[in-house]
C-alpha cells in the first residue's frame, strides 16, 4: 500500500532532519503539522494508465538542487538489495512540503497490478543541519528494533506503523554544503537478512546524494 509507507517515510525522515525525536512504541510520533501535510497525499490506488516498462534510468550525480527521487535508485538496484523478484517500474510522486522541507518520493510499482507498491525512496535536503551522526541517531529512535549500522552514515531496521511493519534503510550525508537524507522503505513483510545488499545500496545512494 502506498499511503502508509509514504506517511512513515515523511514522518521518519522529518524527525531526523528537523532535529526532533521520535518513539517506536506505536510507530513514529510526529508533529501535528507533519500529519496534516502528509494526510493530503494521494490515495493508495493508481488510476492513471500503467507506466511504461522501458528503462530510461539516468543515475543522479550529486545534483546542485534536489528535484526528484527516482534518479537516485533504479528498479534493478532496488531488486538486488531486497531480493525482490517482481517486475517493477518507478513513479515519481508529487513533492510533500512540511516545516520548510521538501520531500521527494519515488514509488517502485509492481507491473502485475499497476497499483501495488513494493517500496518507496524518499530524499530531502536540510540545509540548516550539519551533523550526520545526530541525524542518524534521531532517525534510529523511530526503529521498532535495534538499528543495524552499515557505516558511519547509514543503518537499516524495521519500523511498525499500526499493523504494518516495513524494512527501512536510512542514508545521511553532507553534500553540496547541506545535509541530505535518503530513505528506502520495503515490504511488508520486513526483511533484515541481506546486510551486504543494503550496504551496497547505501553506498550508491550516498555517492549520488
Image (tube, rainbow, N blue to C red):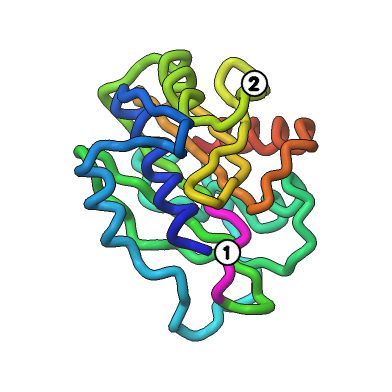
Residue at 57 percent of width and 47 percent of height: 185
| Residue 176 in view | no
User: Is 156 left or right of 18, judged from the image as shown?
Assistant: right
Residue 128: give x, y in percent of width and height.
26, 23
Residue at 64 percent of width and 52 percent of height: 187
Most prominent secondary structure in the magenta stretch?
A: strand
Looking at the picture, does residue 194 appear above or below residue 5?
Answer: above
User: Is 147 left or right of 12, judged from the image as shown?
Assistant: right
Region of the chain picked out in magenta, as a range: 115-120
| Residue at the disc numbered 2 | 149
| Residue at the disc numbered 1 | 117
User: Is 152 left or right of 49, judged from the image as shown?
Assistant: right
Residue at 52 percent of width and 60 percent of height: 107
Looking at the picture, does residue 73 appear above or below residue 203?
Answer: below
In front here: 205 or 190? Answer: 190
Is residue 117 magenta-colored?
yes
State which quadrant residue 110 falls in. Answer: bottom right
Looking at the picture, does residue 95 appear above or below residue 62?
Answer: below
Amino acid at each position: 500500500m502506498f499511503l502508509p509507507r509514504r506517511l512513515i517515510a515523511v514522518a521518519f525522515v522529518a524527525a531526523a532532519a528537523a532535529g526532533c525525536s521520535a518513539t517506536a512504541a506505536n510507530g513514529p510520533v510526529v508533529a501535528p503539522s507533519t500529519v496534516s501535510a502528509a494526510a493530503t497525499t494521494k490515495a493508495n490506488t493508481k488510476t492513471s494508465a500503467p507506466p511504461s516498462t522501458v528503462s530510461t534510468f539516468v543515475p543522479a550525480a550529486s545534483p546542485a538542487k534536489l528535484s526528484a527521487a527516482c534518479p537516485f535508485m533504479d528498479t534493478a538496484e532496488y531488486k538486488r538489495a531486497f531480493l525482490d523478484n517482481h517486475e517493477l517500474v518507478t513513479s515519481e510522486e508529487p513533492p510533500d512540503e512540511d516545516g520548510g522541507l521538501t520531500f521527494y518520493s519515488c514509488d517502485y510499482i509492481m507491473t502485475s497490478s499497476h497499483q501495488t507498491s513494493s517500496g518507496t525512496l524518499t530524499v530531502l535536503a536540510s540545509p540548516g543541519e550539519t551533523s550526520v551522526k545526530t541525524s542518524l541517531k534521531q532517525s534510529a529512535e523511530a526503529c521498532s528494533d535495534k538499528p543495524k549500522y552499515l557505516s558511519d552514515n547509514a543503518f537499516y531496521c524495521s519500523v511498525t506503523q499500526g499493523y504494518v511493519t516495513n524494512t527501512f534503510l536510512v542514508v545521511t550525508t553532507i553534500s553540496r554544503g547541506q545535509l541530505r537524507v535518503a530513505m528506502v522503505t520495503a515490504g511488508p513483510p520486513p526483511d533484515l537478512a541481506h546486510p551486504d545488499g543494503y550496504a551496497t545500496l547505501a553506498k550508491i545512494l550516498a555517492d549520488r546524494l
